[in-house]
Amino acid sequence: MDQNQKPDLDEDKPFLSHLLELRSRLMRAVIAVLIAFLCIYPFYDRLFSFVSEPLRAVLPGGELMAIKVASPFLIPMKLSLVAAIFIVIPYLLYQLWAFVAPGLYRHERKLVWPLLISSTLLFYLGAAFAYFLVLPLVYQFFAGVTPLGVSYQPDISEYLDFVLTMLLVFGIAFEVPIATLLLIRTGATTRQALAAKRPYVIVAAFALGMLLTPPDIISQVMLAIPVWLLFELGLVLSRWYRNAADDQAESTPPLGKR
């Protein structure tokens, strides 16, 4: 009976080793976020001032409100934690890459690094686009349509949720070129098929802008147009990326080794 059980135990060893490796990677990611949080939290005043500056610039008194009792304590902590995650995103992606790399072919490993770097830069670019261009226009719009006799002074809790949602939405939306490349590279579709669906992509971009952004035409258009243009960029880059991937695959010896 012991002899019959040995093969099962041997088969479980790779699975257990993967679990241990995953736990190790997750622990490193959590520690990195914690260290970044501890370094950022003492400067929460400056951080919140920076995040709220586009809105405070259009407020009559230049101040926000804290309606909830615990908001002055919880909001800076939440903002510091999100900022910590935002800063260590490259390290988090590296941990993910280090976990899945042993299961990839050599030519696949060479092509994943450019995707990881470009996806990180695109996410930061999307968040920066939202903060520096979209949010100031949105705040000016909201402040401009405030009825007479109404004081426009948002709560810091709702404001932070709004800002983080906008940064996340635009950061993810700017990943469209990466998604386009992956769809073509994995064989899920072709470049010609995606190009033929361009009208549907444009309509979907404006629909996403309507669903994911506030009910104002400014933020909706400023999300939809970049998504469409980034889709076109993904189609253009797919030619070069596919050729480069094919060259790498042909130059890799057929060892069948991962």
Image (tube, grey):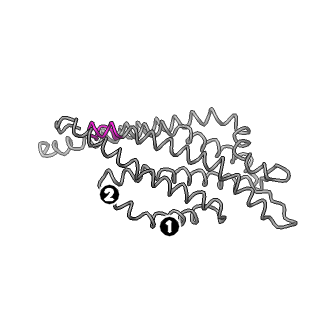
Q: Which mark is residue 138?
A: none
The chief SS type of the magenta part is helix
Q: Is residue 218 left or right of residue 238?
A: right
The quadrant in which the C terminus is found is top left
Q: Which residue is mark 2?
A: 190
Q: Amino acid at mark 1?
A: Val
Q: Magenta segment range?
A: 100-111
Q: Amino acid at mark 2?
A: Thr
Check if residue 117 falls in the magenta segment. no
Residue at image position (42%, 49%) is: 178
The percent position of residue 232, horizontal first and vertical second, equals 45, 54
Residue at image position (65%, 60%) is: 218
Label 1 neighbour load within 10 Å: few <14, some 14-19, many 20+: few
The percent position of residue 250, horizontal first and vertical second, equals 21, 39
CA gap between label 1 and label 2 equals 20 Å
For the residue labelled by badge 1, is the local secondary structure a helix, a strand or a loop? helix
Corner quadrant of residue 51: top right
- Residues at circles 1 and 2 in contact by the CB criterion of under 8 Å: no
Corner quadrant of residue 25: top left
The percent position of residue 208, horizontal first and vertical second, equals 53, 63
Q: Which mark is residue 203?
A: 1
Give whichever of 69, 178 is nearer the camera: 178
Earlier-in-chain disc, 1 versus 2: 2
Residue at image position (34%, 56%) is: 191
